[in-house]
Amino acid sequence: MDSTRRGSDPPTSDASRDLFDASTDAAAVVSADGVVIGWTRGAEELLGHRAADVVGCSAARLVAMPADPMRVAGLVERCRAGMGWNGLVTLRHRDGRRLDVDLRVSASFRIGDRECFLLSARGQRQQWAVGRSVLDGFLLRSPVGMAVLDLDLRYVWLNDTLERFGGVPREQRLGRRLSELLPGLQAETIEGLMRKVLETGVPITDYEYVGWSWADPHRQHAYSTSFFPLVAADDSITGVCYMVLDVTERWTARRLLSLVNEAGTSIGRTLDVMRTAQELADFAVPRFADFVAVDLLESVLSSAGHGTWLTDAGPAAARPVMRRAGMGSVREGCPEAVARIGDRVEFLPPPSDIEMLIKGEPMLVPVLDPSDALWAAAHPERVAHIREFGLHSLIAVPMLARNTVLGVATFIRSLNPTAFQPDDVLLARELVARAALCVDNARRYTREHTAAVTLQRSLLPQALTGGKALEVASHYLPADPIGGVGGDWFDVIPLSGARVGLVVGDVVGHGIGAAAAMGRLRTAVQTLADMELPPDELLAHLDDLVLRLSDERTGDEAAAQSAAAFLGATCLYAVYDPVTRRCAMARAGHPPPVVVTPDGQVSFPELPAGPPLGLGGIAFEAGEIELPANSLLGLYTDGLIEGSDGDLEAGMARLADLLARQGQDLDGLCRSAVQRLMPLPQRDDIALLLARTRVLDAEQVVSWDVPADPAAVSEARARAARQVAAWGFEELAMTTELIVSELVTNAIRYAEPPVRLRLLRDSLLTCEVADGSSTAPRLRHPRSTDEGGRGLFLVAQLTHRWGARYTPDGKIIWAEQELP
């Protein structure tokens, strides 16, 4: 049933009474269950169905409208209440045609025991005829511009609205073509469309275009036009008619939305403040302006400073110091500009002052007047450029984001003859607001990135030395700002017995939290290495530390984020002994090291991978390899081998090929390898640590077996003194005798055989005493009345440092002296 419902009260006028007189209507009787039980001749004439074909069948098949049970139920209830109903419905004729009819439904009544309704219908009739005067008034004064053109596309008729749109009087239009009257209105394109309509007879609707007219020659308007052919009685085409609407406001709103959406993909593609400012200038020229300058406060451009102008801070005492961060022009080289990129500027268009920045309100100068006294007094150089390049209209918009003033963007027109309008201020404001948010994001990220890089560099070793055992070189590159600083670290740790520890690691995550986590792990590795732990035990202790740090949770969000950075880390730790030429290594989820032998053979030792740090419950295993003298050992982080394709195996192959090249110093080799392998963009930190092995000559190492007899102490002491003198360090002979005497005596008295004495000369003079006991020595501070316990205390006073390390067969007590 149609949604239009009219009242059931009978009409009072004669016309209405005739319109709804049921004596000539098609009528039918329908039961409450929708079955036709009565059918009149009028119904047969209206719908073409005979009574024999309809009576006893459902009335639903006569309705050409979607079923609506809820509405039908409502109508039935109304009719049962005695009110009846009438409205417009669509019925289906026998031949398939659809007929719109006025339908009346009576109040319900009964025939026998059946509830029934009387339905009467009448085809719709024309209510009134349009008079000539009414039609002429409609056509001439319609808000839609209308025109009729002949087959030669010359004006035959037009209404008042079209005359007003074009600004050309009716008398001048008639008999002439559009291209002769309005060349700035895409006349040739429009005439081409009208010819197409004349040729095909197919209308063209809602064609939008932009142009100028004599009615408003200094402002661009948008129009929507539809074209359709005029057809005579013999179906021949006699001309073309078009209707046009001024849709400038709709077009402007759509253009604003389109430009703002497009700006979202063009502005803020990087996290660089200067680049974002330049992207705003590049986007606005020439779409919106002929010259754009973006000036930012110096504090915004500074990665170290934190001063910005808050909008609620009130006016400042002095003019802000800004720098030109970006600019663009339709003229090559931006000759209109008074300042270049990076120059200091203090430009605020007169009569504006600091309040313009503080309040954040844009300023529109529709007509720039170079003779204005304010311009001449404040900006004489700019006045000369206004005259020279014809700058005639300006919009200045402060850049604000998160209640913070960042700078100002200035838009100027010169070649474009149209002055800026208030609608243009809305667009400029939207563009600047989007750019300001991107600039603020870039500013905040740049400062955080700079702080993270500074923290990370302060935590990395400032100078590396491998002593006489290794020649070392390193190269480190932080990730690009968009990737964020990671937690890569490396270190070279001198150990006892001329040995050297090498470590490289990578904390999962980026930012200050990752850098701080890296510093804590590096410190932990140094501490554990000083305890002389083998690589696998060191990683096990480091894994426990990461687990404890990961469990740290406080109410402070920053602390929680820092702790979260410890949820994962990888590490590789190696210890090289220049005496035995053996290198022990263990890794925790880290890529394997690369080894290049003196003859150029490259390999990646197959070490047990081990789980990443922070998983817990899984043991680490160490492996050991022999490194000939002048072998190259490389430790690196995964950022070096990931490459742009993310294929780690291919990256390892590229690294091996670069390190196999001979004839390059270690520093140069390290630097060139990183530069060649660095992916673009660099999404992760890159660290490479190279070490070239050396071997202590036989003349630098001597050792003796010492019998487990106290009488052997004097012989050991004498041998040590003679060897030190032979090396040319007679001034250390007496001290060495005392050290050997105390260490050998303790080994014979408190430990187990075998006892062995070894002297090493590299950058230090080292005395080592090995025994078969695993009992740890303990430094005591004896009182003046104690008769013993001064041995290790005396050794600690005489040496540079001393300590103990454990071996599979026992332990070694060592003491180091600085060489003169």
Image (tube, grey):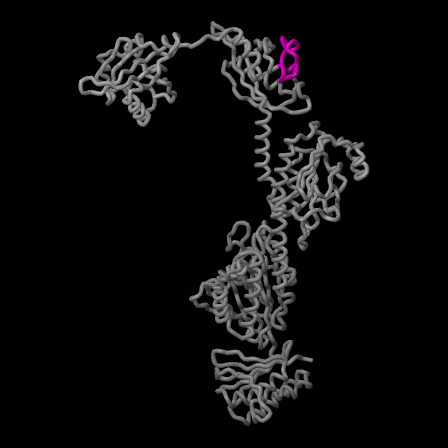
Task: Pick whichever, 63 or 186, lies toward us.
Answer: 63
Q: Where does residue 514 sit, x and y in percent of width and height?
A: 55, 59
**Quarter of the image with the C terminus in it:** bottom right
Is 717 on the left-hand or right-hand side of 71?
right
Quadrant in the rendering for residue 265: top right
Q: Is residue 569 visible?
A: no
Q: Where does residue 371 sit, x and y in percent of width and height?
A: 80, 32
Quadrant in the rendering for residue 331: top right
Task: Pick whichever, 336 or 353, lies toward us.
Answer: 353
- Residue 367 colored in magenta in the image: no
Relative to residue 368, is residue 647 depicted above or below? below
Q: For the magenta stretch, what is the residue range?
A: 163-181
Relative to residue 498, is residue 682 depicted above or below? above
- Which residue is at the far left? 112
Count of residue discs: 0
Task: Pick whichever, 598 or 703, lies toward us.
Answer: 703
Quadrant in the rendering for residue 77: top left
Q: Where does residue 81 sit, x and y in percent of width and height?
A: 29, 22
Is 538 on the left-hand or right-hand side of 211?
left
Q: Is residue 110 visible?
A: yes
Q: Where does residue 147 sit, x and y in percent of width and height?
A: 57, 13
Dominant SS of magenta comes to helix
- Tell me the residue at 55%/94% (across/down): 711
Task: Pick whichever, 209 or 759, lies toward us.
Answer: 209
- Residue 177 colored in magenta in the image: yes
**Quarter of the image with the N terminus in it:** top left
- Tell me the residue at 52%/64% (across/down): 571
